[in-house]
Amino acid sequence: MKNYYRCWAEVDLNALRENLAWLRHRVGEDVKIMTVVKADAYGHGLKQIAALLMQSGSDLFGVANLQEAQAIRSVGRGWPILMLGACLPGEVDTAVRDDVMPTISTGDEANRFAAAAKKSGKTVPVHLKVDTGMGRLGVKASEAWELIEHVLGSPGLDLQGLYTHYASVEDDAKFSRQQAVEFGHLLQRLAANGIRIPLVHANNSGALLHEPDTVFNLVRPGLLVYGVVPTGRRPQASTLQNHLRPALSFHCRVSLIKQIPRGTPLSYGQTFVSPRQMRVATITAGYGDGYLRAGSNRAYVLIGGRRCRVLGRITMDQTLAELPRSLAAQPGDEAVLIGRQGDEEVTANQLAAWCGTVPWEILTNITYRVPRVYRGGQAA
Ligand SMILES: *Cc1c(COP(=O)(O)O)cnc(C)c1O
């Protein structure tokens, strides 16, 4: 019974290592790589992934909160960590204590960190964010100069980085160009005034594919590290995707097989009624595992190396799928929700399209009850 799971995710650490190596190759030795490991390393398991990325040459880590930063520190010390979200007032002392670099968008945030720096006797490195069109964090470009001067003039603060974030980089070339130009003007003004900020960055995964001119000296890939290439309306000019492979696959098993006559309604709400006699497999994954209910009647799973259509509503723990007539399947057989089986593959991007969402949500929705099984590399 050892390792006989009903539903599990496999993480290929060699894929992660090789993906990072390709990103390194593409950006060159002079550009630092901040691997983004928020949300449990995109559902892959934060500690194991952080350990692997530390061994594989990640220069910095990007996180969403202080707990994630602490988890990284528990694996290895010394890596700079940037918190990509705004730090709450009640978190400032902890961030300073744990050496987590904050993202600064306002004078108030800068002041809180300057006060905490004074109290702790530390110099606090910070990254200042410029809002060029995302509308979430960051100071407006027109007010960035003032905030930069404020931070530079605040004792205890060390302005380590300046960054921005694209809003529609996979879809909208024009808007992205506008964002790049706005950020570029600020950089020119800084250069003209002899102000040098050590780290300048703009590129997440999509921007690495579509906006190579804004690589500057640090990049912030998330999705690409995990081997998933974000897709959108902009044509892919980059060939990077040909060299990356998905690290995660998502598996469950066939638990029952039934023959049903024509006219049989299936699952909650009876959204599917068999148009003919069919063979139907019950499989051991549902939305309680992160197999999104939105994929009901739309998604496909792989059984016996064949594509099998999901029938009716996906339920919490179980899903139904049609078995092709010629497929000899049995209870206990593996069903693949994301990944390869035989010559077939279901990608996170495909599953996301069937579910009307994005691959980021597919990966981060795989729930805690799904064991992550690590292969290759040396896990922590
Ligand atoms: C999440 C995040 C990233 C990584 O995004 P990907 O699209 O997964 O590469 C980069 N920068 C910021 C600010 C983020 O919040």
Image: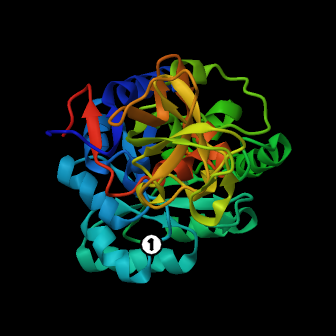
Q: Which residue is mark 1?
A: 87
Q: Is residue 34 above or below residue 209?
A: below
Q: Position of residue 233 (x, y in %)?
A: 79, 38
The quadrant in which the N terminus is found is top left
Q: Position of residue 25 (x, y in %)?
A: 48, 20
Residue at x-position 35% and y-position 36%? 331
Residue at x-position 42% and y-position 82%? 89
Judged from this view, the residue extending furthest toward the right is 174
Residue 107 image-quadrant placement: bottom right
Q: Is 339 displayed left or right of 232 in the figure? A: left
Q: Is residue 251 above or below residue 238?
A: below
Q: Is 192 displayed left or right of 173 in the figure? A: left
Q: Position of residue 152 (x, y in %)?
A: 50, 64
Mark 1 surroundings: few (<14), some (14-19) or many (≥20) residues within 10 A: many
Instruction: Work out whether residue 279 can be spotted.
Output: yes
Residue at x-position 74% and y-position 59%? 133
Nearest to the observer: residue 146 or residue 329: 329
Q: Is residue 101 above or below residue 249?
A: below
Q: Is 338 displayed left or right of 235 in the figure? A: left
Residue 292 image-quadrant placement: bottom right
Judged from this view, the residue extending furthest toward the front is 261
Residue at x-position 58% and y-position 60%? 129
What amino acid is at disc 1? Answer: Cys
Nearest to the observer: residue 182 or residue 87: 87
Instruction: Work out whether residue 30 can be spotted.
Output: no
Q: Position of residue 225 (x, y in %)?
A: 46, 35
Secondary structure at numbered mark 1: loop
Q: How is the image coloured?
A: rainbow
